[in-house]
Image: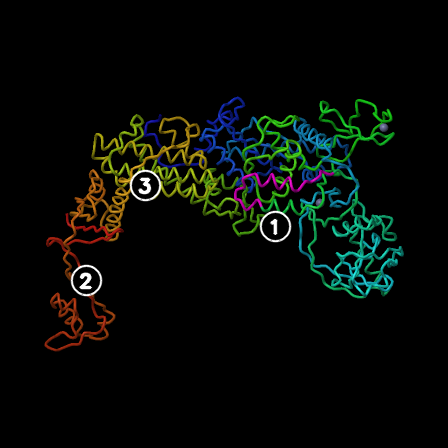
Amino acid sequence: MSPSTEIPKTYDPNSVEEHWLQEWKDEDNYFDPVSTKPQFIIDTPPPYPTGNFHIGNGFNWCYIDFIARYKRMRGFNVMFPQGWDCHGLPTEVKVEEIHGITKNDVSRDEFRQMCRDLTIQNIEKMRATMRRCGFSTDWSNEYITMMPEYYRKTQISFLRMLKAGDIYQSEHPVNFCTRCETAIAFAEVAYEDRTTLLNFFEFDGVEIATSRPELLAACVAVAVHPDDERYTETKGKTLTVPLFGHNVPVITDEAVDPEFGSGAVMICTFGDKQDVYWWKQHNLDLRKAIDSSGKMTAIAAPYDGLTSKECRERILADMKEQGILNRQEKLDQRVGTCWRCKTPIEILSERQWFVKIHNEGIIKAAKDIMWTPDHMYSRLENWASQMEWDWCISRQRVFATPIPVWFCDGCGEKILPDEADLPIDPTAESPKHPCPVCGGTSFTGETDVLDTWMDSSISVLNVTGWDGGDIPERFPAQIRPQGHDIIRTWAFYTILRSLALTGSKPWEEILVNGMVLGEDGFKMSKSRNNIIPPEDILKDYGADAFRQWSAIGAATGSDIVFTWNDVVAGSRFQTKLWNIARFVLMQAGDAGSLTADSVTVLTDRWLMCRLSATVAEVTEAMEAYQFDRAIRAIREFSRDVFADNYIELVKGRLYEDEGSARDSALYTLRTALATICRMFAPITPFFSEECYSYLGAGSVHAAGWPDLSFADAYADRNGALLAEVVSEVRRFKHDNKIALNAPLGSVFVYADQEIDDAGDASRALNAAVTWTTEKPQLERVVSDVKFTMGVIGPALRNKARGFMDAVRALSEEDLCCGVSSVTVDGEEVAVPENAYEPVYSFRVAGEEVDVLTLNDGVIVTVSRTA
Ligand SMILES: [Zn+2]
Ligand SMILES: [Zn+2]
């Protein structure tokens, strides 16, 4: 333990935080695989390694770290792993940009290596920020999805689900981004509102309205409502598609809205989901007019080779020229776009791999998970119940987990590797055995790769110890913390995959955090220029202030606005608490040998009650993940109760007293400081460690969570009264410009019982304080007169002075009751309205006192003269 004289006067967060970063060991945060403590495994989100650990990540990780540290203190064997979800398009795009190439300029292998190199550099940068934030990450449980040991598991999970019939390959319409040149899942479609033009033209006299004339070449039918009498004659006939000349049937379907346009719609393969439904329902032809790069195909001749946008312009121009475009109307519509690049998606029919979605099982499992806040559950339920298509998991990209499948060139048979041989890249390796069907030895490896969510949706299996077997040793995890923006992806897919691979839910609980908004209240974005990098906050205020902002800025689950004010408030609170801690340490720093038996004095017993109540409140808040409530309770107790009331009450005793009464205060001070440090440790790990280190009781993070139950109803009630009396009289001194340490005369407290405060009130007020149950014998007297010069001046002019003298000379009774006139220089002068009012004061036994009225009818009299 350091002697109390060495405690620095000011708290410098940066030097303190740097110091503890050096002192702390990674091993302290490792999950212990052989521990007998109950496990608490956190299925931490694996961020995408962009190189920037942004403030949204920081906010999310603060929550995780609060929980991890809290649970460790509660005696759990905590695993706070750190994953990196590496695969995907953004890295491919970045690599193309950095090297000035496209993915097709180099071999697949070379391109992947470039992606891996960039990813490793980015991870390194993000790790540094995470460490600086003080997160108690378990680096022994780090995983990187692009590493063979991880994607081997992704491949095993693929094979398992394929063999179980939960994964299949099929030609089916899928959402497709023609810029990224890959299929995407429904969850990756973002929606935007746009205004477009609805174009009206005719198919053999039947008017059709469409917003996508470029799909005319893909038209396979015209549909009308079966009851629409306008088309009774047309049903069952064929119509000729303008410009292209192919014939299409007229079909009827209940789903056609007769009110929209002319009541006749063209069905194309594919304009939207409805087209897909009709196409299946009526067994229509497939006409692919747009290819995977977004260009028009030969079917669209003479427009083939154009982009769909160019084609649309040319078709409309041609229609105008030929006089077949009847009219155009504005149309508001929601357009599905690629979530990464915002290109409007196309629905293309492609040979793809799919995961079967069993909505009901997912909803049932999700219901069985505890959601915080609980309303977030409905987001998952809504999403799951509206899923109509299976999950498309194949991507036509490079940097991703390869799909471990070959096809026999002889007979087309699907050839699967042995699990023991995984991981494999089927484009670079061959099967070990000839084709079991035809004996052929020539194979083609699948070039499609897996959706990144196939990697990240087994994160929970990975951290609970899955190695391809049935149910992992430590499955399910205790909690999944994540943002609400990825409920329909990461949460949904994880539940789906856990059910498919283990038959049960992935976690006991899920904690959903909100998004971070800029100071202007908008989502942070480059274009709004409202991005705050965490490094800026760390540099100026340190990690603990940043962490306090995360805790207090919003209720759990709500979006949080970043404000420097909250960070500054956090920093100021640290300064305040540091001053409190210094005082306590200088007084009670070496009082570590005292025990709870020392607490005898009312003030101390009261503080112990309040401290117990605070521990109960903070514990309840932490259990419910209400970090804002927890930090508010800590701040309120430390500042208002401990510093402003308690310390002021006991200071005198510490300076003047010796023996047991002093020990009572010393024990209480020390216990309160240690308890504050322990409660505050999950939120401000550096600050708490620094303060606690001066108590000579080891690391605060190794200390248990405070367990305090000091119950003393008498002290709780009367200590509160004592604190109130002292604070009211101190306020009275302040209001009357009397120095707080200046002596007063006697102070009487008229309450319903006499309190033995061991002299604390007298010392705190520098006055003789007497508690009495008697009723105060107060005598009210007029002690002065207060004149209203604004009334007297104009009304009485040169008689004002004489008037005031005359009023002062009035009897006490006349002053109280009021008179209509007074005599000034022998002349009767009327008293103007509101000219004066009497000032009353009180006397007790002939001595003038001030009277303060407290709650519960307690009266305090103060005589100012000592
Ligand atoms: Zn895209
Ligand atoms: Zn074969």
Q: Is residue 468 or residue 57 the one in the foreground?
A: 468
Task: Work out whether mark 2 precedes mark 1 in sequence or the reverse, and give the earlier one.
Answer: 1
User: What distance separates the C-alpha of mark 2 from that of mark 3?
Assistant: 37 Å
The residue depicted at 21 percent of the width and 48 percent of the height is 751
Q: Earlier in the sequence, mark 2 or mark 3?
A: 3
Task: Please state the horizontal and vertical placement of residue 504, each as a whole percent of the image.
Answer: 61, 33
Amino acid on which the number 2 mark rests in the picture = Val
**Quadrant in which the N terminus appears:** top left
Residue 604 is situated, as x and y percent measured from the top left of the image, at 27, 36
Left or right placement of residue 589 versus residue 520 in this view: left
Question: Where is mark 2, residue-wise?
Answer: 839
Residue at figure coordinates x 52%, y 32% from the top left:
131
Q: Which residues are magenta?
A: 354-377
Q: Nearer the viewer, mark 2 or mark 1?
A: 2
Cβ atoms at labels 1 and 3 below 8 Å apart: no
Q: Which mark is residue 711?
A: none
Q: In this figure, which residue is indicated by the disc labeled 1?
A: 527
Residue 101 visible in this rendered orientation of the protein: no
Compared with residue 200, is residue 424 higher up or lower down, i.e. above or below? Answer: above
In terms of secondary structure, where does tag 2 sit? strand
Q: Mark 3 — residue?
A: 643
Residue type at numbered disc 3: Ala
